[in-house]
Amino acid sequence: MDEKYILNTINQHIKQDINMHTCRRLVVTVPLFKGFPIMLINTIIFALKQEVFIPDQEVIKRGHRIDKMYFIYYGTVAFTDELGNEVQYLNDGAHFGEEALLRPNEPATTTVTALEISEIYTLSNAEFTACVELYPHIQERLSENQRRSLGRIFPGRRQTNS
């Protein structure tokens, strides 16, 4: 089966429906998005970009600036500290890097590496900002969250250990 060929032959509406179905469960689990209107959630889902990482490929490098959030559709990633010790694993359905939506370009405090082929959807700060632009009450809530945050870029709340 040639997935890329098939996806290129279907119309844009069907592609959006597939993306909506695939990514909805990833987005609605994020605490930052709790209470967002359904239209905003849908806009966020449409803004997601798919990336595929192969085993041992770095998703995020410690010290590099982060400007997007990551949603693991399938696969497993490992977080390693400055000494190279694996400190956490995340897999299917997990997310990380949501702080980049509030404070883009903060340096990562850990390296994230794919342990197996991993399909990961990303949401850039710029795309997120464009999505919430029409929701002033959401922008105010996010500004309040930003004022209260500690400024650490670290894995999301949903986690599993392998």
Image (cartoon, helix red, strand yellow):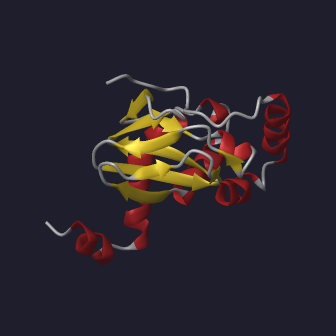
Toward the front, the furthest residue is 83
Relative side of 32 to 90, left or right: right
Nearer to us in this view, 137 or 56? 56
Q: Quadrant of the N terminus?
A: bottom left
Relative side of 63 to 84, left or right: right
Quadrant in which residue 160 is drawn: top left
* Point 37% across, 64% down: residue: 14
Relative side of 96 to 19, left or right: right
Q: Position of residue 114 (x, y in %)?
A: 36, 45
- The answer to whether residue 91 is above or below residue 87 is below
- The answer to whether residue 122 is above or below residue 71 is below
Q: Quadrant of the C terminus?
A: top left
- The answer to whether residue 132 is above or below residue 89 is below
Q: Position of residue 11 (x, y in %)?
A: 37, 74
- The answer to whether residue 159 is above or below residue 97 is above
* Point 57% across, 33% down: residue: 30
* Point 44% across, 47% down: residue: 23
Whether residue 68 is visible to the viewer of this picture, yes or no, is yes
